[in-house]
Image (cartoon, rainbow, N blue to C red):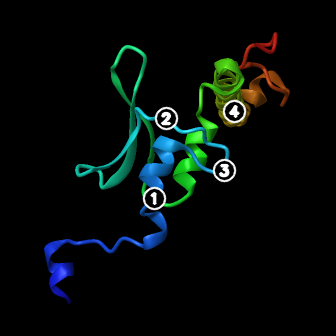
Amino acid sequence: MTVADRLGYMEVPTDVLDIGRRIREGDETGWPGDPTMGLYVNPATGMFEVIGRDARGDEYVATTAEVLDHRIILQLIAGDWRRDGGRDVVARTIAHNEKLHAARQAELAEQAAEVADRIHFAMVRDTGHLYGQNRRLYAVTDPRGK
């Protein structure tokens, strides 16, 4: 173990030394640059953060990354509100949230169907012989499909 390792130093590859400049000034990937942004390391999480200032002067975290490389610029490009007048980011966020909600609803419906099948099996096993049938008598889900 070297002295640098014991002191908690971290080796910085030379190809990432200009990422802070590229964040502020822009680069060839299509990122136009933002002079209000800076690259910082959060000591609590150990992650790299790009922090900028909005029109009111309030600070906000634009993106975070565990590894400092070109992907942080790509994350900034993907979340840039200036593209398409900001409408694209809002539309993508709404679409993403709707997709998550639909997936959660499908998961809940699948769980409800499984519970309904288990309840049906238990009821038929326990009381089906009294009614002389083995079809489902009770429903857990909404019959209207909602």
Which residue shows up at 74% across the image and 19% down it? 139
Number of disc labels: 4
The three-letter code of the residue at mark 3 reads: Thr
Which residue position holds label 3?
29
Which residue position holds label 1?
18
For the residue labelled by badge 1, is the local secondary structure a helix, a strand or a loop? Answer: loop
Q: Are marks 3 and 1 in contact (CB under 8 Å)?
A: no
The three-letter code of the residue at mark 2 reads: Asp
Reading the chain from its start, which is encountered first: label 4 or label 3? 3
Which residue shows up at 50% across the image and 43% down it? 25
The three-letter code of the residue at mark 1 reads: Asp
Image coords of residue 46 (percent x, y): 30, 55
Which residue position holds label 4?
103
Specify few, some or many for label 4: CA neighbours under 10 Å numbering under 14, 14-19, or 20 or more.
few
Reading the chain from its start, which is encountered first: label 3 or label 2? 3
Specify few, some or many for label 1: CA neighbours under 10 Å numbering under 14, 14-19, or 20 or more.
few
Reading the chain from its start, which is encountered first: label 1 or label 4? 1
Tell me the CA gap for discs 4 and 3: 33 Å
Tell me the CA gap for discs 4 and 2: 36 Å
Q: Are marks 4 and 2 in contact (CB under 8 Å)?
A: no
Reading the chain from its start, which is encountered first: label 4 or label 2? 2
Q: Nearer the viewer, mark 1 or mark 4?
A: 1
Q: Quadrant of residue 50?
A: top left
Q: Is 27 situated left or right of 92 in this image?
A: left
Which residue position holds label 2?
34
Tell me the CA gap for discs 3 and 2: 14 Å
Q: Nearer the viewer, residue 28 or 65?
A: 28
